[in-house]
Image (cartoon, helix red, strand yellow):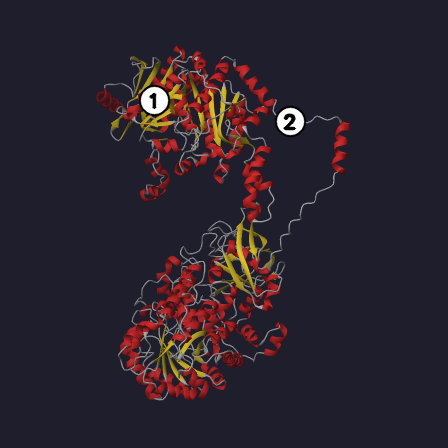
Amino acid sequence: MEPLFEEVCSVNFLGFSFGGRSYTEQIGDAVKKTGKHCAVDVSLVELEKGVRVVWVQHDFGFLGGSLGCAEGEKVTKAFEYATSAGLGIVVACKTGGARMQEGTLSLMQMAKVSVAVEAHRARGLPFVSVLEDPTYGGVSASYAMQADVRVAVAGARIGFAGPGVILNTMFEMNQGQYDRHCPADFQSAEYCARNGAVDLVVEKAELKTVVETVVAALTKRGDSAERLAAVSAEPPSPEEIAAEPDYALSRSMKRPQFTDVLSQLFAEFVELSGDGQVGSDACVKGGLARFQDAVWCVVLGCAKGHTPGDMQKANYGMPSPAGYRTAKRLMRLAERFGLPVVTFVDTCGAWPSFPAEDAGQSEAIATNLTVMAGLKVPMVTVVLGEGGSGGALGVAVANAVGMLSQAYYGVISPEGAASILGRYKDDAHKLVQFPKDCYELAKAQSIYAYQLRELGVVDEVIYEKTDETFEAFPVTQRRIAAFVASHLAKLIAASEADLVQQRYDKYRALGEFLELAPDQREHKLAEAKARPEKKRPARAAAAEPCKLVTYLATQVLHSERSRFMGLAPPKCPLDPPAAPVVDPSSSSATVENAKSVLDAKGPEAMAAWVRSRPEVLVTDTTMRDAHQSLLATRVRTTDLVKGAAVASELLAKAFSFECWGGATFDVAYRFLNEDPWDRLREIRKAAPNVCTQMLIRGANAVGYTSYPDNVVEEFVRLAAENGMDVFRIFDCFNDVEQMRVCANAVRKAGKVAECCICYTSDVTTSKIYDVAYYAKVAEQIVGLGAHVVGIKDMAGLLKPAAAKPLVDAIRAVDPSIPIHFHTHATSSASLAVAVEMARCGCDIIDFATASMADLTSQPSLNAFCAAMDGMPRSPGIDYMTLEPLDMYWMRVREMYAPFETGMLAGSARVFDHEIPGGQYANLFVQCQSMGLGDKWEQVLDMYRDVNKLFGDIVKVTPSSKCVGDLALFLINKNLGAADVLTAPNVDYPDSVVGLMQGRLGFPHLGFPKPVQDAILKGLEPLVERPSKALPPADFAKVKAELGLDDERASASLLYPKVFADYRKFCDQQTALCAYLPTPVFFYSFDLGQTVVVPVPAHLAEQELGKKADSVTLTLKRVGPLKKGRMRTVVFDVDGLEQSVEVKNPAAEGEFDGPMADPADPSNVASPMPGAIDKVLVAPGAAVSQGDDLFVVSAMKMEVKVKAPISGKIAALHVRETDKVVEGALLALIK
């Protein structure tokens, strides 16, 4: 070893000093520590294989091996010395990068060394870099990565920007975020190898041997072309020559593959992997090796594997773009150092995948073809097995091509050709004929070696011993070696120009064709025209998509929780649960219960019967208030009806099933696209033996405002006719006059009028809602002629201690009237309250089946029955008999997971905020839809504050909705409840304005006047019952104008916009939503999923375009994205395909529309996230400042958007139902 350039030393030429320590001192410390004056040593070294090289070694002990001016000078001198002496160079890097104490000149050393590297490269001299731990920064980004071969030491850290720099710059020192995003083995030698940045990774102990081998190969140390002549093999026998080839044998895992041939024919193999830039490949393997101890060469081929696991690891022998670029890099390396190239082909084809196409598969193969065409060194190729199309050709444009006799080489596999050209009557015919067609096409396409030799594609058939395997193939091995050796011997002697010309001539000559004179071409054209035309059977035209399929195709991509788009809950079932099979009880249809007494003797007799019962009776709320409270009222008719049929058998003793009314009426239209009247009739049919029960809001019916008296009366009549028995009537302010019209209508229909006291606060402590207050309301209810007094504890605020005072107060008014108690389990105290109410003489209590109970729902029926067992007033229901019903609802609930409140346990906080259980779930979903999900606790507090602002009102639908609307509105506007009294120019939700105006009625103490004035802004409040001032509705006119029956006319009068939207949806989208399985309705289809949808006869033609009582649908395909974000969605519809073009949704979180400019008053912006409920203007319309332009809604809260300036509507940017974000551009005013 001869040291060089020891005179070059580091110096503090900038006079750099920082933090009380000079760079001069740092240099001095480094010199003392290492005994050196620079971080780089240069030596002249003779390797064991007799090759002299210049060896450059970084010393990490000297200022972290960093690159300064002295280091740059020594490395540059090393390259210049190697260039002038015609020597190879090895640079061992161990460095933190460029040295900051020397400023920009340290950076310039990267360029300085690079010009010397290029000058050395131009002389055709080898350069090997060794990347030790660590190799970072400027060295990594210059000469460490400029080498012909880059050898990394196992475990070394290698990269440009160190982890600390990335942590500081990109993650602002957030270690958690850095760790979360950091790739596996980041910046390790192994990481770099996987990503194509280094050629090989070796253990420290093997480093010297590997480097010596690489240098020996690149300098062709020990080459002897004469030895090639000694390689020979036995000639093939006549039987081997005559053997019929079989393309299937080319795929056998038992036959010799590239790695087997490599180990037998080549020695001292050093694998060089990766494309040198960003990728490596599991299939293409290559490197430097000595062929038959004769010549160094570059050898490469397609690896496969002899086990399924190894095949998988090698990507089944299919190269990626990185594989072809690795081959290109190795061929360039061979050309640079005058090494022959030997390639072995065994691939079914290039990797057909999205990643491969993204990475430029075509370009990678195409570039290789031109690189091989111009390669100035010999190239020999052997097709060992499969020669699949361009994937094989991408490493096979050689001077000489040999091919094993059982291999194939073609433009397409026989199976691929048969799948395109074959014609089969059915699957059975295909099973027999397809293999035959494959073999016939293999021959017809001339893909075998003997055929391709005749065509000039291959130069020699290498006959293989078919009984040999990869474990031992001596004969085949020698024949392959002889072929390679004989051709290398000839080609090595040729000049570079002759090699390129020979390759040109070889491939230029390939191809068979005719050259015809003009008259010959005309003759052939005439012959072609005269030939009888063979008509192919016409393909069946694709059916036009029917209405239902068009809707479903859109839902596949646009459903809010699309299963295909990955938005469905992870454990949501594909199919709805079947109703459990329950042995019909012999007594269930004949047992005396409230329903049998009502039907036989009327409501008065039924009330007396209830009062006479020793046991407490139960109402099951599962089908109404339970799912309204837990699942945002989203449970669909199909699931309710199956549950009702089971409940009718298991709960024949029940007083009633609450199953209709309340929020379920409008939600059915609004969110479920089904008709609530159909629901009522189907539930009645499924459970004919138990009273049905509904919730009706007195003068508000099932709406959120007051209606003309005749609308309420007609609604009650129709509900009774369609199967309703018990009407639970209430007023949100306990105003009995608001219940009178409804109660009278119920009595007239011969049904049960249960008039309610809405319970709030605490009867034992409240100064507003005390015993006297509730007794007075009870007295008024009795005077109204109610059959039952209901206690409606909407939020579950009644405590056990309040049960006796409340029951006693009602009993004191009229001991003969039944008391029906309804509560919610929000606080977790409700079961104790229910037991206490039963003990105090309450006649009927509401419960829900266990799997739909508790939290904001009702207490558990199962638990109550078990707890009351042995008590005097036990309901007499064995809780174990209810298990089938409970299991059914447990499985149903799984389908509605997105509508859960997220509440995992009860909360005594309800005694503070007093949110009704039935509102809690809806309010939570509403909160989330407005983007306020992370402010839920603030919403709870704001609800409480708004209630106090309003004077502590009774909170039940619809008054509770108004409190919730204002709470969400204020949080969205960053306002507090007290700000309502002072905030200027605030347009409050319509529901809140209507509340203050008295459209819902009046609290018994009224509203605080300052609050009322602030919200109404000059609007006059009503002074009498709202409905009294409304003119009667003209039912005949509505029915005639809209073409509706009685029930739908009633719905239209109750919810004009909601019902109109529902009809529009049925007309324009589909009327079959109610018949879809619940998982399909909410989450759409998964690929390959099949469902059978029942179709009513009157809808078949308009929905399917044919008569049918059902339709079988399978989602067959969702095509890839096309121009304009379009996809083709394909359904199989009763055996025929129907396809629909659907626009793919915008990216997650991206609003697919323009945003308003806050600084431009002509821009009308959305005040909140939601949907466009109404567009009140048209383009060109003249508007004045303050005019209503749009109504934006989020769930059930509506906000009017007013004109910010006067002018004309220049453009509308939204339509009704469009979803918008806050600040979205709605319109332009000029």
Q: Is residue 232 above or below residue 628?
A: above
Q: Quadrant of residue 516?
A: top right
Is 350 in front, or is 1037? 350
Q: For the N terminus, which image quadrant?
A: top left
Is 768 in front, or is 227? 227
> Is tag 2's residue or tag 1's residue first in the polypeptide sequence?
1
Q: Which mark is residue 512?
A: 2
Marks 2 and 1: which is nearer the front? 2
Does dot 1 land on a helix, a strand or a loop? helix
Q: Disc 2 versus disc 1: distance between alpha carbons? A: 49 Å
Q: Residue furthest front?
A: 239
Is 758 in front, or is 27? 758
Q: Callout 2, which amino acid?
A: Glu
Q: Which mark is residue 210?
A: 1
Does dot 2 land on a helix, a strand or a loop? loop
Q: Callout 1, which amino acid?
A: Val
- State whether residue 142 appears in this view: no
Q: Which mark is residue 187?
A: none
- State whether residue 718 appears in this view: yes
Image position, residue 109 (x, y; %): 38, 22
**In percent of the image, x 61 and y 72: which residue is there?**
1042
Image position, residue 468 (x, y; %): 43, 28
Q: For the C terminus, which image quadrant?
A: bottom right
Q: How many marks?
A: 2
Image position, residue 411 (x, y; %): 56, 33
Is 479 in front, or is 998? 479
Image position, residue 1203 (x, y; %): 55, 60
Q: Residue furthest left?
A: 32
Q: Residues within 10 Å of mark 2 (few under 14, many from 20)?
A: few
Q: Residues within 10 Å of mark 1 (few under 14, many from 20)?
A: some
**In percent of the image, x 75 and y 35: which residue is there?**
527
